[in-house]
Image (spheres, helix red, strand yellow):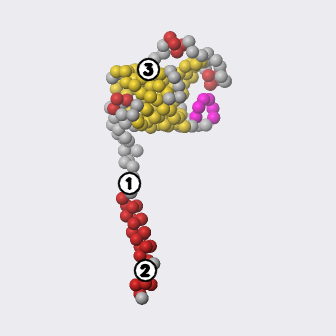
Amino acid sequence: MLRRTFAFLYPVLFLAIGSWYLSLTACSPNANIQGMGEGFLQGEWKQKANAADQQLVNYTLYNFKFTCDSFYVQMNTFSKVNYGADTCMNKGHWTEYAKGLYNMRNDTLHLKGFYTNADQSLKNLGGCFRAGVYEEYFKTRNEADTLLQLTNTSGVLPLNLQLTKRLTCVPKPL
């Protein structure tokens, strides 16, 4: 009789022990250290202007820095058309910055971060140019050890980048 009285507790006890076991084994905290990133990307990469760029109404030249799993990008934009206040456009030349984390899947480079000021502090919403989330996808192609071609998946013109400084990843605590 006593056994029947407590029979309803067996499923509850089973669920409690099962939940406790899963909570111990199913998840683990992320490491408190920066990821290694991709070895071939580590360094500073610069895009140089060419004659075709200068014939366009607008074009942007990129400078990338990849350290471990992080990226920093400087975007120098040139325009023959004034889209806004000249205090922002500076007579057709302006610079924007972004930083964040990157990852590679097959030949696709995914950059996700935030627009920043020149000192890499987060940019406030409002003011000149873009602010908030920066996210881009690029198809990558290594031309040589010091040449890299990135093609934005939402664009057609490739970015031909040259390695200007090789860096070694030294992971930092988060």
Indicate the amino acid at tag 2: Ala
- Of 110 and 170, nearer the camera is 110
Q: Earlier in the sequence, mark 1 or mark 3?
A: 1
User: Which residue is under mark 1?
Assistant: 28
CA gap, disc 2 to disc 3?
71 Å
- Category of crowding for the residue at label 2, using alpha-carbon neighbours closer than 10 angstroms: few (below 14), some (14–19), many (at least 20): few
Which residue position holds label 3? 160
Give the amino acid type for the residue marked by disc 1 in the picture: Ser
Kindly identify which residue carries mark 2.
7
Q: Which mark is residue 20?
A: none
Q: Which residues are magenta?
A: 126-131
- In this image, 167 relative to 99: left or right? left
Kind of element beneath mark 3: strand
In the rendered view of the protein, which quadrant contains the N terminus? bottom left
Magenta run includes residue 128: yes
Please name whichever residue, 3 or 42, is drawn nearer the observer in this view of the structure. Answer: 3
Position in image of residue 49 (x %, y %):
48, 15
* Amino acid, disc 3: Asn
Observer-nearest of 137 and 115: 137
Q: Residues within 10 Å of mark 1 (few under 14, many from 20)?
A: few
Vertical comparison of 130 with 21: above or below: above
